[in-house]
Amino acid sequence: MRTERAAIAMTRSNQPRGLVRRFGWLAASALLLAGASVSAQNGEVIRVHDVERESYQRLVELGDFWGVDRAGGYVSMYVDARQRAAIEALGFRTSLDARRMASLNYARSVDARAWRNAGLAGIPGYACYRTVDETKADLSTMAASRPDLARWESIGQTWLEANGEPGGDELHVLVLGNQNSPHDQAPFVLMAAQHARELTTAETATRFADWLFDHYDTDPTARWLLDHREIHIIAQQNPDGRREVENGESMWRKNSNLNACPSGPTGVDLNRNSDYFWGTFSSASACNETYRGSAAHSEPETQAVQNYLQQVFDDQWPVGSSEPVPADAEGLFISLHSYGQMVMFAWEGAGSGAANHAPNHDQMAWLGRRFGFHTGYEVGRDILYSAGGTTPDYAYGEFGVPAYTWELGTDFHQSCSAFESAMWDDLLEALIYAAKATARPYQAPSGPDVRAAQAVWNAQTGSLTVSGIADDTRFDRNGVTESPANDPIHDIQEIRASFDLPPNLAAQSFTILPLEAASVSAFEASIDPQETLSLPRLLFFQATDSQGNTGVPEAVWVREQRAAVTPASMAVVLPAGQNVQQTLTIAHIGSSGSLNWSVQADLPAAAGDGHDPSLDETLNIADFALPGGGSASETVPAGIDTRGQVIGFTFEGSVSNLGSSAWASDMAMTITAPDSSNYTVGGYNTGNPDWDFQGSGSGSPGSYSSSHIGTDVFGQAGVGDEGDWQFVFDDTWTGGMNWSNVSVTLHKQEPPTCVDPAGVAWLGIDQTSGSLAPGEDADIVVTIDASSLDQGQYDALLCVTTDDPSAGLVEVGVTLEVVNGEPQIFLDRFEDNSGN
């Protein structure tokens, strides 16, 4: 079947015949530059401006195509003088990419031996990225410490190892999944570091493994994923090449096949060496960075991966047919690369145009747009240049699993600050979604997500309260116009909930209706589980839209409600000068632990009315120096001069000693509130919101300011101001700079009720705090006193806080109506017998 389907794929790649004419200029370019390579020290990084996507393929043949800078609108390439002249001869405008040239020079300047001799961890110059040895040690330790959750396996050899050369290695895979799970575990293969110089990729795969492994016992998502998925992580697919980078060959891309261009750039491009479309859209010249090798799967690294995928995936193609893979196929393959902020998928080697789309193109596009929602990356098959012999094409072509290339970030050597502050969280969310979708990758993306779900068990009433949001809109292609034109967005039909297993596997499930007929709808219901729940317990949710499309499962821990507060409100009518006592009861209705509570009174306040300048609070930051790629931080208390909800800020400061090609806007600032909410602004190609002074206009010493206010900072309600605020400043470039006279002014709005209860003169509380054991309750006497009040209505709140996270803050409204103290007259003007 493999040979037959490859023939089908190759036939598709050569149709229509116009492709031969369309790319005829490639042959001429290849002849002009055949065998040409750029010396590691003699080239330069240039920008090729105003390049249409259709011309990317042309540029690939003329030099080392680094990537597309979406924000700047140019292509970055590493070329020598002859290659640059050839590019310009085709009518392209070029300029020096000074920033990436400086980044390259920084990477070259790092003394790897001195780094290691100093006992520093990580790749020299980039401490956040683990070396090959560190990656292997950390991942193998998982399997050794928890063999019930992980296996560490050797799957083959590198070229150096297979050929008896020193420094060779084995390829390894970490297989994560509950080894004792009774459930089917759909396979997800995540591969990284196929190209040695792309630093973020191996670290992304390894951190995903860290997250799954470390959170299995505590996080409901990690728990169910490892119970129901088998996740295969090949974090270092090209360890020989990566070690070259670690030892100072910072731009090494290929493997270490010493027979392929010994003078450099040495090796075979492993992402042009797989079986499908091998020999197309790649180079036959050993000294080209996209050299495809002497034959398909000629390299031991390629053989190892292809053989391993044969063990992991079933062949799901219809027998003897090029029709789409059935919609109920399972499994997923993702290969991590950098850079370009793109999500691409098979066929990568078929050539451009809709006629060359894969049979499952639309389904792969919709899953890709789910990834695009989380990452902000462009999504499409035909959005970069065509590449034959890629591993994703092999995975899709051989087994029918959806297969993707993710181009991460904006640099091969992404700064640690940019990776950790602007990239990692989004990549983790996208990888989690990928794992969720693995069992139904062609179907689940068309269905709604469930988010913000909660489940609270009340043992006293035997009821389970559930809530959340069903959302069928979370697609984003980020500007790509490739088909399909529309995403499968429909109204929410229903949400199903089930204990312990996803609804499609559970013996019993509960149907919940959305609160409105819309593509995004909240849901809330009280469920009778028909049993007494023993916690902890997983509750799964899965939503279906009006077209019958069911999305990925979501799981939460069921939490026990421990606090009950009664009554929900109080309303009193009193003659002027009198008072009355009411009772507020706080009960511990849970089964374990103590319940700590407090009660305070507050007046209602208008919340969310917008920025109130009178509440501004300025925090002064000590002067600091940022070395190239370095960071500085400071913690400052707030909520001292004024109190309110922070909804934005203004940064002000003066910069000096700007390094080579550095801009003030290269500095990224992360501001973290006392409740851990955070917002990051600025930096070079980080994907963060821009400074007001973003760009080359900030390339001179001077004073700069930038204001950021609105719901995108800390949400509509804002965040509480009282407590320590942390500021972290990162140089996302390599130039370095100094900052002085720095201040951050917090912009606030009026606080909502019960944020800082100040007491109410006409309300008295006889107990303000306490602790309860299970089954106990406390009766708090509330005195409502109208002795000094005029006639009219008065409103207040009793703010009840507990350490029960399911209860949160309980606000008990108190309404007092003060009336004339004279005897009351009925509406018929007659008095009753008592004289009232």
Image (cartoon, rainbow, N blue to C red):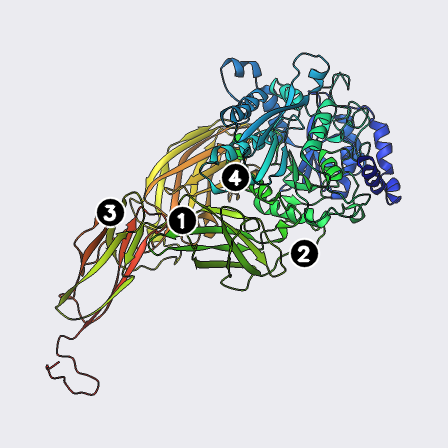
Q: Nearer the viewer, mark 1 or mark 3?
A: 1
| Residue that extends furthest to the left in the rendered view of this protein | 834
Relative to 292, is 448 on the left or the right?
left
The answer to which of marks 2 and 3 sits earlier in the sequence is 2
Give the residue number, with chain letter if any, for mark 4: 425
Give the residue number, with chain letter if any, for mark 1: 533
Q: CA distance from mark 3 to mark 4?
A: 39 Å
- Residue 752 seen: yes
Q: Nearer the viewer, mark 2 or mark 3?
A: 3
The answer to which of marks 1 and 4 sits earlier in the sequence is 4
Give the residue number, with chain letter if any, for mark 3: 772
Q: Tell me whether the residue at label 1 lies in contact with that at label 3, contact meaning CB atoms closer than 8 angstroms.
A: no
**Disc 3 residue type?**
Leu
Relative to 78, is 704 on the left or the right?
left
Q: CA distance from mark 2 to mark 4?
A: 28 Å
**Disc 1 residue type?**
Leu
Q: Tell me whether the residue at label 1 lies in contact with that at label 2, contact meaning CB atoms closer than 8 angstroms.
A: no
Number of marks: 4
- The residue sitting at 20% across, 55% down in the picture is 779
Q: Which mark is residue 486?
A: 2
The quadrant in which residue 793 appears is bottom left
Viewer-nearest residue: 222 or 339: 222
Secondary structure under tag 1 reads loop
- The residue sitting at 62% across, 26% down in the picture is 236
Q: Nearer the viewer, mark 1 or mark 2?
A: 1
